[in-house]
Image (tube, rainbow, N blue to C red):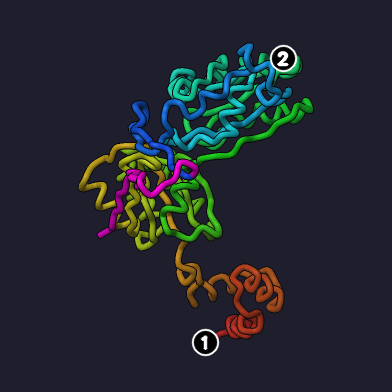
Amino acid sequence: MPSGTRHGTKPNPDQNSLTPENAAPDFAPDDVSENPLSPPDNSFRTQVNAGDRSSKHDESLLPLSSGLYLVATPIGNLGDITFRALDMLKRADIILCEDTRTSGKLLSRYGVKTKRIAYHEHNAAKMRPEIMDRLSKGQGLALISDAGTPLINDPGYKLVQDCKAEGFNVTAAPGAASPIVALILSGLPSDHFFYAGFLPPKTMARKKELARFAPIPGSLIFLESPKRLAASLADMAEMLGGSRDAAVARELTKMFEEVRNGTLDELAAHYAEQGAPKGEIVVIVGPADESDNEPSPEDIDARLSELIQTHRTKDAADILAKETGLKKRDLYNRALELAKPTGD
């Protein structure tokens, strides 16, 4: 059966061993995210917003230069915001949010008073002309998603395209992204990977999509809803191979973070029995065993027989060698045998 690991970090510094110069900050529980690693309320109060009068004497707090700023936000733990991200959000003329209410929790936590405007997939076509107009007037606009890195499974790439086409500056403040966090926690190969996002909700469409991903030589990364997790894992086992190693990650960076490893068959059985888990889900499927991709002798003969119908024997062997990576000489000799006329 698959094994699960659950952990939540609880800071417990030995205050008596620290001098005033190197003393660690006293981290208090976060009343918004309920994560013990979020900085205390007064972490960034020395910095004011660009629109505040007191900021006019500090050039570092002046409004951003004109352009679009893609700012990553935490995927769960509010302490994962970066200093540079907060600086951009405070200095931006406008913050474009996927959901202004959701983003408001984070911005309020750090005293960011910059005006927020909704920009999401349902109003993107309508809002882009207004955004382009603001940029043409020299404004600096920050784009954030509800959680994580903008444009990764979120709206925004068309806006970036338009900005580049018009010659506006586009830059980013990088940060958390749940697909990458899940990948590095899974323990599965990370030298080659493919991010597939959400699979279709219907079984037939989902299987068709999985069939497209099966030949990819690397780890596969999927997002999934808790209620569809068991069904999706069963379809993955059928289409990708039940013995493939995989991991289900949920509640990443939060107190009840969990990464459960096992084969696709084991994970499908576990969640079918246990029911839908809580939290946002990322599924990592490890690469297929290379031996599974090697053609059988029967497959080789069938392909060679097909090729020699329309190609010279030498050319048929050359084509199949490129398709399979097998030795051309061996394939040529086998093609000669297959080409021999059979007796009565």
* Whole-number angstrom distance, CA of label 2 to CA of label 1: 82 Å
| Residue 123 sits above or below residue 221 on the image | above
Chief secondary structure of the magenta span?
A: loop
Q: Residue at x 48, y 29 (%)?
A: 43
The residue under the point 56% across, 14% down is 115
Q: Earlier in the sequence, mark 2 or mark 1?
A: 2
* Nearer the observer, 175 or 204: 175
- Residue at which label 1 appears: 344
Tag 1: amino acid: Asp
Residue 14 relative to residue 307: left or right: left
Residue 206 location (% of width, % of height): 42, 43
Q: Badge 1 local density, few (<14 within 10 Å), some, or many (20+)? A: few
Residue at image mark 2? 133
Q: Nearer the viewer, residue 161 or 243?
A: 161
Q: Secondary structure at mark 2?
A: helix
> Residue 108: x and y, percent?
46, 20
Vertical position of residue 263 compared to residue 335: above or below: above
**Is residue 7 inside the magenta stretch?**
yes
Q: Nearer the viewer, residue 244 or 30?
A: 30
Residue 340 can be seen in this image? no
Q: From what the image shows, is residue 160 above or below residue 184?
A: above
Q: Residues within 10 Å of mark 2 (few under 14, many from 20)?
A: few
- In this picture, which residue range is highlighted in magenta? 1-21
Placement of the N terminus among the 4 image quadrants:
bottom left
